[in-house]
Image (cartoon, rainbow, N blue to C red):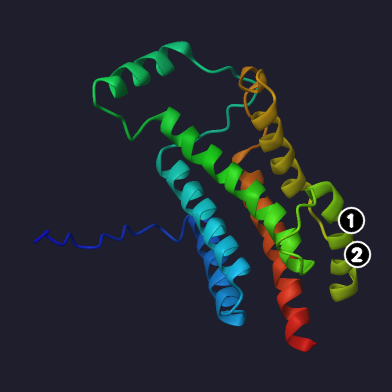
Amino acid sequence: MEKQTAVQWVAIDLKDPTYKRVAGFSRRIAYLLQARPTDPHLRDTLDLFLGALYSIVLAKEGGFVDRVNKSTQLEAITTRVARLGEGCFRSDGKWMAGFHFNSALFRIAAVYHRLLKIVLEDPQTGATRDTLRPKADKAYLNWTKKRWSRANADAVYGEVNHIKHKPSATLAQRQAKFNQAHEAAEELLQLVEAFVQYKRKA
């Protein structure tokens, strides 16, 4: 019989602005899960969103700093790949902090596209983000009488798309900054919160 390992929770300092904001995002996600518990598309997308928040926390825990316009470091890559080939990996350092931040960016970009489908009530559509975005803009304006601010979500999505499709993308390195991931998360939460509020009133 396998030995059960104890669940380990690591406390974060909620006096820290980053952690305080992430905790706030998490509470809002919890509300959305409770508001629409039978929506599997929203549930799974919010799970992906939670992963982005975890990645932001892990990036900060690893000492992430914005380093735009810097190329990848051959020595760091060579060392890590060689050690992994020997059966060892390193879970700390700037490379891992960047790894977690990149994970946050990719997750935020995926959440963006999926939330557009959800709020337009067509979760199975194969439409692109660019096709769905104007419709979501119109819907948000109808729900809130305000324009949806999404500049940071657009920037994160654009950067991830660039990394996915351009072989030279890593040479230019990431342009998105740490705070931009937070702002993108805020924008996406505003979109889905407006949708949920609209559905509750309907």
Q: In x, y percent, where is residue 169?
A: 66, 23
Secondary structure beneath label 2? helix
Looking at the figure, which quarter contains the C terminus? bottom right
Q: Quadrant of residue 6?
A: bottom left
| Marks 2,1: beta carbons within 8 A | yes
Residue 78 falls in image quadrant: top left
Q: Left or right: 168 with respect to 201? A: left
Per the model, the C-alpha gap separating discs 2 and 1 is 6 Å
Q: Amino acid at mark 2?
A: Lys
Q: Which residue is mark 1?
A: 134
Q: Horizontal and vertical percent for residue 194?
A: 76, 72
What residue lies at 70% left-to-right and 36% top-to-bottom?
Answer: 161
Residue placed at 32% from the left, 16% from the top? 82
Look at 63% across and 29% down and name the residue there: 174
Secondary structure found at label 1: helix
Is the residue marked by circle 1 packed among few (<14), some (14-19), or many (20+) residues within 10 Å? few
Q: Position of residue 61 (x, y in %)?
A: 41, 44
Q: For this view, does 40 lie left or right of residue 82?
A: right
- Determine whether 2 is above or below 145 in the image: above
Horizontal placement of 56 versus 70: left or right?
Answer: left
Q: Position of residue 135 (x, y in %)?
A: 88, 60
Nearer to us in this view, 181 or 169:
169
Residue 125, numbered label: none
Q: Which residue is mark 2?
A: 138
Q: Is residue 45 above or below residue 121?
A: above
